[in-house]
Amino acid sequence: MSAQNIGWSYNVIDYDSEKAMHHKDQGKITFNEGKKALKFLNHPNIRHTPYLQKDPRMCICLPTWLELLDEKPAVLFTYRHPLEVALSLKHREENFTLEHGLRLWIIYNMRALQNSVDLCRVFTTNEAVFKDPMLELQRINNELTEKCGVLRPPKWVIADKVVDEFVDPKLQHNSKVRKAEEEKRNMLKDYGRGCIAREFESDYPEASVNRKAEVEMYMMAMSVYCDLENGRAYIPDYEWPDVAHWHRPTKIN
């Protein structure tokens, strides 16, 4: 990514998989860690060795890795409310705006679905996991094995202890707090089926250009979020928001 002047938080929409492969083949980038990964991922016994790879950047770089893998992986796709993600990034990173966090949320979810369209996928959400962790994790387990052919675990039924270790109570609490606070705010738009965009706190004055841009990006993100909720975003010809013209990225130093 760095060879294309791309980082996890800037210019990600411009990532070019073919260019990345060309850089690799021409030796313009170091690939030492990648070689170690492929030694494991392309091992003859990999079918008998279940593995999990979790890195948001894979949403962007997946086409490059698919060219290097001998076996196509199964994909577990999940998502969070865009405002939760944007607020988390804003609090965690220096000089990070809500607008930029919302833009990244759109791009990462867009690329995740576009780049995995030919793979076996199982879909879930943070809300579904928090609502009934045992039921949802068991459903995910069943679909990965029965639908996608992932190796069946030694214990078919997930134990309560495993579920408790997997689900972070802090995230569950934060989600409930956000929902409670959100319901107190005025509605900006009702997207149907109970999916509503509401007003949110901002660092910018109400009539400022930055505030207007922030709200517009939020509405684009909420449109996608509601389409993920109702299933429309999963159709092959889904029309994603045009965020390519929003050239206001924040580079983290």
Image: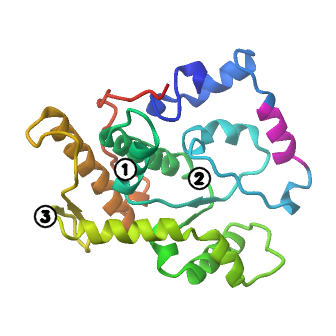
Please name the residue that numbered disc 3 is placed on.
186
Point out the tag, 1 or 2, that comes first from the N-terminus: 1
Question: Label 1 crowding class (10 Å Cα cut-off): few <14, some 14-19, many 20+?
Answer: some
C-alpha span from label 1 to label 3: 19 Å
Secondary element at image label 3: loop
Indicate whether residue 52 is drawn in magenta. no
Q: Does residue 34 show up magenta in the picture?
A: yes
Dot 1 corresponds to which residue? 87
Q: Can residue 195 be seen in this view?
A: no
Give the prevailing secondary structure in the magenta stretch.
helix
**Residue 134, percent from left and from top:** 60, 82
Which of disc 3 and disc 1 is earlier in sequence?
Answer: 1
Task: Classify 87 as above or below 28.
Answer: below
Which quadrant does the N terminus fall into? top right
- Badges 3 and 2: C-beta atoms under 8 Å apart? no
Residue 157, picture quadrant = bottom right
86 relative to 47, above or below: above
Say what amino acid the circle numbered 2 marks: Asp
- Give, as a single range, the part of the protein colored magenta: 33-43
The picture places residue 105, in percent across and down from the top left corner, at 41, 47
Asked if marks 1 and 3 touch (Cβ < 8 Å), the reply is: no
Residue ID for mark 2: 118
